[in-house]
Image (cartoon, rainbow, N blue to C red):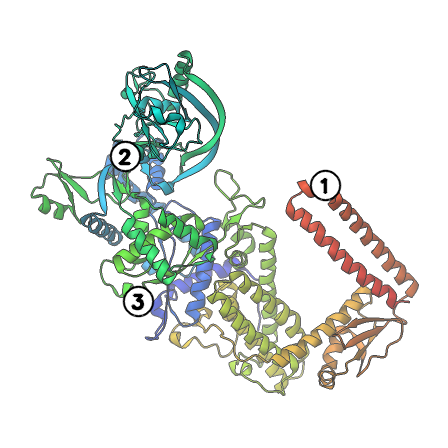
Amino acid sequence: MEIPKQYDPKQAEQHHYERWERNGFFAPEINQDPEAPVFSIAIPPPNVTGSLHMGHALQHTLMDVMTRHKRMSGFRSLWLPGMDHAGISTQLMVSRALKKEGKSRHDLGRELFVERVWTWKRESGGQITVQMRREGASVDWSREKFTMDEDLSRAVREVFVRLYEEGMIYRGNRIVNWCPQDQTVLSDLEVEKLPQAGKLYFLQYPIKGSDRRITVATTRPETMLGDTGVAVNPNDERYRELVGAIVLLPLTNREIPVIADDFVDPEFGTGAVKVTPAHDPNDYDMGERHNLPQVVVIDTFAKMTADAGERFAGLDRYKAREKVVEEFEALGLLEKVIDYEFSISKCERCKTVIEPLISTQWFMKMDQLRDLALDLMSREHQPRFVPETPYEKIYTNWLENLRDWTISRQLWWGHQIPAWYTSTGAVIVARSEEEAREMAGTAEITQDQDVLDTWFSSALWPFSTLGWPEETKDLETFYPTSVLVTARDIIFLWVSRMVMTGLKFTGKKPFSDVFVTGTILDAHGQRMSKTKMNGVDPLDVFDKFGVDATRLTLAQVGTTDTRWNEKQVESYRNFANKIWNAARFALLYSEGAEVKPELLQSTNADLALHDRWIIARLNKTAREMNAALDAYEFHGAVQTLYHFFWDDFCDWYIELTKSDVTSDTPSAQRSQARSRLLTVLEHALRLLHPFMPYITEELWQRLPGEKPHHPAYSNAEPTIMLTAYPQGGPVDDAAESEMQTLINLISGVRNIRSEYNLKPSDKITVLIGIPNAGLRKVIEENTDQMKRLTGASAIDISANLSAPKASAKFLLTSTDEVAVPLEGLVDFAEETKRLERKKEKLQGEAKKLQGQLANPDFASRAPAEKVQQAQDRIKEIELQIKALDQSIENLQ
């Protein structure tokens, strides 16, 4: 059969994906077995504004490997795709487009702006779904969801109303994280706490009716204009007599009390702290405990308010800081300023410094939901994190310290909060405006202008996408889902919230397992990011090396942080070429042959050793692959596949069966050898398919013979993705052991030829001493193979080795020896000199490396991996010198 010399990844990627999708192979309905077990997985919905990055490519590869494996194993499999509406990011993207037209969203008004966003979404959004098709992602596109779809929006409103009716959602004034740039509140999880070098200011406040002053230390002097108290620890002897005293607050005409509170750390600063309830979360809590007033001196644009005093009103917060410090210094009340490193809170998206402000927002009480999640972990150890350490502890620790969640956002794009207000100020929470009017008894109502945090709808993703609150067939079949694949940075934002809402609204956990992927770093070990401009575009890698090679590289990452190395992708492209060339060889010699699965069922002892061995290796590999995939051991699975196909199948089996396969004389033996080769190849392609879908489909379609689908898909069009994933039959341990001896023997003789520079035309004699009669028989039965693969003209096998002195020798086992006489093949004197020169060169290299390691500067300053490389190389040289010494001795 003719087959192109080279594999064209792009042609295969385009042709096969379109056919898979068109024929409905990705939909669970393709499975016709009513008793089929179920596997389901929901994609972490990428932002509608996003494009494919390495993190997506990694997660999608692992999810697709799982889904394809389960589908081939007969599971009714659903991988559900979709996108997140990404409130802030999408609103900003459309706002920027409007700005280029000289307009703002306020010029359009809310309704027209939201229409504009929907238009953008239809025309430009969702680029990532096109890119996912390129990846080979076998998601069911017929079930694709968007968090703003009407059915998902209905689920959001239902959850909000139920929680409100139970008193778990409330509206109130509380201190929040405010982003002055994006003009919206942020949850604690949307705020980054970053170390920053700054200043610690020591400010003196006079005590009323006394010459004494109390010194407070602060990193934000401008907020002192809103102080309503000074706090000390009740056990701090230095200030005990001042508790209850009145402080004259400088730069203002206000008097504030000294209070005692256990929260105060006597070790920080002077042990006395200023209390600004309107601009610090901890101060807010302290103010609540002591009934302190809240004076707002910074507004939503991070400018000072009128309550800050007319000299400061309108100033930017940092300009106000300078002015406060200047005035304290002029009054002689600035005790000192020192350098100080502290954590600063920034908006995760735009990096603006957050301003804690008191604001009217919607909040969700988390205590009941938290207890549901903690109880599930305590009772059932669910969800099971992979790896368990450290993620389970991180998850439970966070839950134990959970605070109420600020769920409202000051945006136009998103799920508008289903709350309406009457002219008298009454709040009506309802599932629709029509219901709200009925409840209010009037049509004169106004909907709350805020939208819900994007993560509110994402928290419902596993069940809202399956039709909840309706009791749909999909919800009944595919919920709970089987596993969640995610990155570690959204365990809090997303994973925990899905667990809590799933338990609350369905009574079931949303998934059993959480697989936390590693992170792909750049070549220098840094996280990839747009700001650092160090990202690698997966599409560029696909173009250069092909999707299959990229997927195999990504799959082996698993849970480990890994530096991106293009050479690794190149090596897997070479692997894809190796697969292609092996299949091409089998197909070029496929006349009179076809895939015959029964040829692999045979345990006939009359089969040649290499045939019994490859069947044993195939069965063992299939078992190992299923075990590895079920345990999420992707790295191990990739290595198992690689070594089976490259080492066992290509390097050994094809070579051992080649003489029969390429025979010019038609015979039953030739046909069977060819058919067995094709059948082993067909099984190997099935094992590879979840990782390398395109090349395996391309080759599988070309194979002649019996290629039945898994029984669950018997009526489907032919495709490798619906065949049965090999489970692995009995393993012939004797065949493996005997063949390994033969491989070691052939490899040892080849090494001698290489070490002594023997030409291929140099005919050698191989002398073998094996005391064990059974093993001797195995070698005797395979002497023809040995001669062909080692270039030996004669092989002499006996119970005890008898070899001339000038022979190259090696131990096959502790009792079995092999020798190749060198007389007449090697100029002993010249060869000895060559080996001595090689030894001297290695000794020089070792000495140089040892000198480096002995140098304290190198040992302390060089990267750890450089030091390790030097140590490893020295060990390698020691082994090489030992081998050279043996070779030199053989020539004496």
- Disc 3 crowd rating (10 Å Cα; few below 14, some 14-19, many 20+) is some
Residue 267 lies, with reference to residue 810, above or below; the image says: above
765 displayed left or right of 549:
right
Q: Residue furthest top?
A: 330
Along the line of sight, the residue nearer the viewer: 454 or 533 = 454
Give the x, y percent position of residue 148: 28, 49
Q: Are marks 1 and 2 in contact (CB under 8 Å)?
A: no
Which residue position is annotated with label 3?
Answer: 477
Task: Say whether marks 3 and 1 touch (CB < 8 Å).
Answer: no
Furthest residue to the left? 441
Q: Which residue is mark 1?
A: 856
Inter-mark Cα distance, 3 to 1: 64 Å
Three-letter amino acid code at the position of disc 1: Pro
Q: Quadrant of the C terminus?
A: bottom right
Local secondary structure at mark 3: helix
Kind of residue indicated by mark 2: Arg
Which residue is depicted at the point 27% across and 34% down?
288
Query: Mark 3 is on which residue type?
Result: Thr
The CA span between labels 1 and 2 is: 58 Å
